[in-house]
Image (spheres, grey):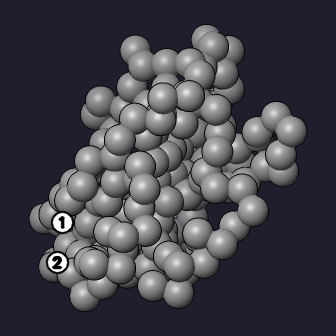
Amino acid sequence: MTESDIQNVLGRHLFLQNICIPNVTMHVPGHRPYEADLIYFNIKSEYITEVEIKVTMVDFRNDFKKEYYHDHPSVKYLYYAMPESMYSRNKEEIDSMLNLAGIITISEANMDIKRGPFPVLVRYEKKARVRKNACPMSKNDKIDFMRIGCMKWVNRKQGGVTCI
């Protein structure tokens, strides 16, 4: 399972009620920008949920060594999404490192993104806790994110074919 596979599964799971955007450069005043693997927000919400996707434990551990840790001011919830098997094998270690973050697992059963509708289980194993210092997005922030989202999904390639 790749990061792109997980982005697609989560996008399909969330899109009916949320704006979902993969690989977004998040600009934080006074810090270097960082890339969020996936963000989503409800059109009525003023806050972002960020999803950091991990497919290996090495990558998960390295995330906690970063100088800046998913600190965009409008991120109210942070989740780590990962294969279900990775979480079940490393549950204690992962849970001990989370702090306010939550966990989303993706089942690898019947994982065939290219064939259309598929029964993949998305499970919120641990609910993320609210970041109390989160700041609401402005209307212009939402519009900017939605514009980026349209460009990201429309220009995404799978198997050499542009998905539209």
The structure residue drawn at horizontal position 43% and vertical position 56%, both measured from the top left corner, is 99
From the image, tell me which residue sits under label 1: 120
Q: Is residue 42 left or right of residue 58?
A: left
Q: As displayed, is residue 114 above or below residue 31?
A: below
Q: Amino acid at mark 1?
A: Val
Tag 2 residue: 110
The disc labelled 2 sits on which kind of residue? Answer: Asn
Q: Is residue 61 above or below residue 75?
A: below
On screen, residue 31 versus residue 160, left or right, reads right
Q: Which mark is residue 52?
A: none
Report if the CB atoms under discs 1 and 2 are less than 8 Å apart: yes
Q: Earlier in the sequence, mark 1 or mark 2?
A: 2
Residue at the top extreme, as displayed: 139
Judge whether 130 appears above or below 78 on screen.
above
Q: Quadrant of the N terminus?
A: bottom left
Residue 140 lies in quadrant: top right
Label 2 crowd (10 A; few <14 / some 14-19 / many >=20)? few
